[in-house]
Image (cartoon, rainbow, N blue to C red):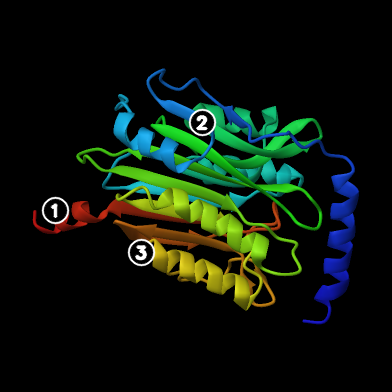
Amino acid sequence: MYNRFPTCALGILSLFVMVSCVTIPSQTQLINGKTQNSENLVSANCSVEKIRQSLNNAQEPDLQLDSTNISLLNWNIYKAQRDNWPEDFKAFIAAQDLVLIQEALNSPQVTSLLDRHHPHWNLNTAFFYDGYETGVLTASKTPSLFSCGLRATEPLIRLPKTVLINLYPLTDSDEKLLVANLHGINFTLGIDAYTEQIRHMVEIIEQHNGPVIVAGDFNTWSNQRMNIVDAMAQQLSLQAVSYSSHDRVKIFDYALDHIFYRGLEAIQEDTLQVSSSDHNPIKVSFRLANQAIALSQK
């Protein structure tokens, strides 16, 4: 435990140095990959009214997620700073239907790997790093019906953290899958800012009655923070993925990365140990809950 404190101190110092080298946009800014269908809704800012409109007005695209097998990768890629990052990223995303990235970078190094298999992506910009937008990014083989973003500012270092919410159609079902990708506020002396970030995300997700996945780097490095996330899961009727391994990155014995879900069944999960980021990626496969019932009756 004690040998972590010098490392943490150096990490905080490096963050303050980095802050002087970044540019922060004045408002929420969503970057789109492949052009979405013109009927679909893309909004920079999430609001209760906009998510309600999207649920009522979104048009079905030709492509849909397979409700019997939805594969997902969740990974904080550390702004693609490590030399062996591209090889791992290319291998991990290949077979996934949904790719949720924190500390993503809108650089050719990242987007060129996505465009081949996951051309439909959105990035909610936290700030510009080395001239590129960085934030949370959600990519898919299927166009989303709706995308919107939330942004909250770190109280100490004053860098934003972002949330991206997407809505996807499912095969053989009238239900839509809401996917929330979160990078949680990290450097605080208390829990007020963290609580508010989670509360705002919950307020949006509560408008959706269908299946939900909430995943990301929650920065749950304390019991207080984990209690806030547990309360979020209870309020939204979410279930935590049960991990067969203990390879998620931890600080002070608390895992930072989580995946929660409802209206789905988790089929398979795996956490991969890597040196290409300071977080280990998580892979999970889901199927729609009523699909699991239908399959058992065949």
Judge from the rendering whether residue 276 lies leftward or rightward of residue 287; answer left or right: right
Point out which mark residue 294 bears: 1
Taking depth in this image into account, of 294 and 208 the one nearest to the observer is: 208
Amino acid at circle 3: Ser
Three-letter amino acid code of the residue under disc 1: Ala
Label 2 crowd bin: few (<14), some (14–19), many (20+), radius 10 Å = some
Q: Name the residue type under label 2.
A: Ser
Q: Residue furthest left?
A: 298
Q: Which residue is mark 3?
A: 237
Q: For the N terminus, which image quadrant?
A: bottom right
Residue 226's quadrant in the figure? bottom right
The answer to whether 40 is drawn above or below residue 28 in the figure is above
52 or 110: which is nearer to us?
Answer: 52
For the point 56% across and 27% down, which residue is it?
Answer: 32
Local packing at callout 1 (Cα closer than 10 Å; few below 14, some 14-19, many 20+) is: few
User: Which residue is at a point 29% across and 40% down the rendered structure image?
Assistant: 66
**Which numbered disc flags the more N-terminal residue, 2 or 1?**
2
**SS for callout 1:** helix
**Rendered view: 17 above or below 104:** below
Residue at 55% across, 54% down = 216
